[in-house]
């Protein structure tokens, strides 16, 4: 407890709204409690008037999220305490409802399996032809629009899409911290399969092989990503790092990109 967060929401018009807070309570798998305040881009708490909202808005709200296991499903309950009644409360309700819908789609649409003690298998069906899904994986200009969590900015440092070609992506958070990943393409079979090595530069020497296959079914595409690790310990370390949540978010962002490209 006591850790802080800072995130930014961007309106369709391109305006940024920053929020910050402190984690008050964390009970793994059961409950999460944190404060919630408007902020500037440096994380300093600011009044709601900073964003053109009413003076009756408190400097700090509290968010409590509880998780209940019900026959293999999860009931998630969120309480946002301190929100003024009226239009702001209605806007917050609509915002949280939309967020819950996106979370449900991200969690339910992507499936994970562990075929062996050195493998992770991820699958999702996309409502797009496989040529387009393959293109999103192999065009440098499209990678930053879906690869990795949305809270990070992804830059393609190199991407030579051919057997023996190298790739390197760099991600940056709001504080300017960098996280780099690299690898070598092993196989490119358009639009059916891409295979490459994958290494997080923060933990050099732990290299896995990732293979993405693209199967078209009646105009939709089943994407299967198989990660093969050198050791079971490496596989388990990847799972403990939050890989499932990150992969689900990436694939949700990919689905949004494909919808935009299909329009």
Image: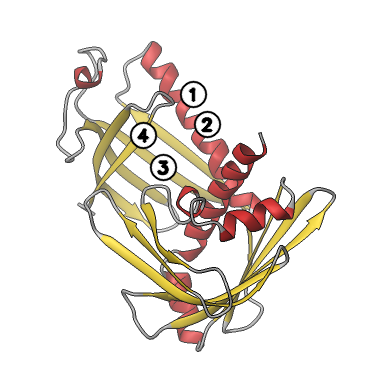
Q: Earlier in the sequence, mark 4 or mark 2?
A: 4
Q: Is residue 63 above or below residue 70?
A: above
Task: From the image, tell me which residue sits under label 1.
Answer: 94
Q: Earlier in the sequence, mark 3 or mark 2?
A: 3
Q: Earlier in the sequence, mark 3 or mark 1?
A: 3
117 to the left or right of 56? right
Q: Secondary structure at mark 3?
A: strand
Disc ID at residue 65? 3
1, 212: nearer the viewer: 212
Q: Is residue 196 visible?
A: yes
Residue depicted at 54% across the width and 55% down the height: 248
Q: Nearer the viewer, mark 4 or mark 2?
A: 4
Q: Earlier in the sequence, mark 1 or mark 4?
A: 4
State the separation of the CA atoms marked 3 and 1.
Answer: 17 Å
Q: Is residue 12 above or below residue 86?
A: below
Quadrant of the image containing the N terminus: bottom left
Q: Secondary structure at mark 4?
A: strand
Q: Are marks 3 and 4 in contact (CB under 8 Å)?
A: no
Task: From the image, tell me which residue sits under label 2.
Answer: 98
């Amino acid at each position: 407890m006591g850790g802080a967060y800072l995130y930014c929401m961007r309106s369709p018009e391109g305006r940024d709204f920053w929020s910050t807070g402190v984690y008050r309570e964390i009970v793994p798998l059961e409950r999460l409690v944190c404060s919630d305040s408007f902020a500037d881009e440096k994380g300093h708490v600011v009044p709601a008037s900073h964003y053109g909202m009413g003076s009756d808005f408190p400097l700090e709200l509290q968010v409590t999220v509880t998780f209940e296991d019900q026959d293999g499903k999860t009931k998630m309950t969120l309480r946002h305490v301190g929100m003024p009644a009226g239009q702001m409360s209605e806007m917050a309700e609509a915002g949280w409802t939309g967020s819950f819908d996106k979370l449900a789609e991200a969690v339910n649409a992507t499936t994970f399996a562990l075929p062996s003690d050195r493998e992770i298998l991820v699958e999702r069906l996309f409502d797009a032809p496989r040529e387009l899904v393959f293109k999103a994986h192999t065009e440098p200009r499209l990678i930053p629009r879906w690869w990795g969590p949305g809270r990070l900015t992804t830059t393609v440092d190199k991407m030579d899409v051919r057997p023996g070609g190298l790739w390197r992506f760099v991600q940056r958070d709001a504080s300017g911290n960098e996280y780099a990943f690299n690898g070598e393409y092993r196989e490119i079979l358009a639009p059916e399969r891409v295979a490459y090595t994958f290494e997080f530069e923060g933990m050099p020497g732990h290299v896995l092989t990732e293979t993405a296959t693209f199967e078209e079914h009646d105009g939709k595409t089943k994407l299967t990503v198989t990660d093969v690790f050198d050791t079971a310990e490496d596989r388990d370390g990847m799972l403990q790092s939050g890989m499932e949540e990150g992969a689900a978010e990436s694939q949700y962002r990919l689905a949004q990109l494909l919808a935009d490209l299909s329009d």
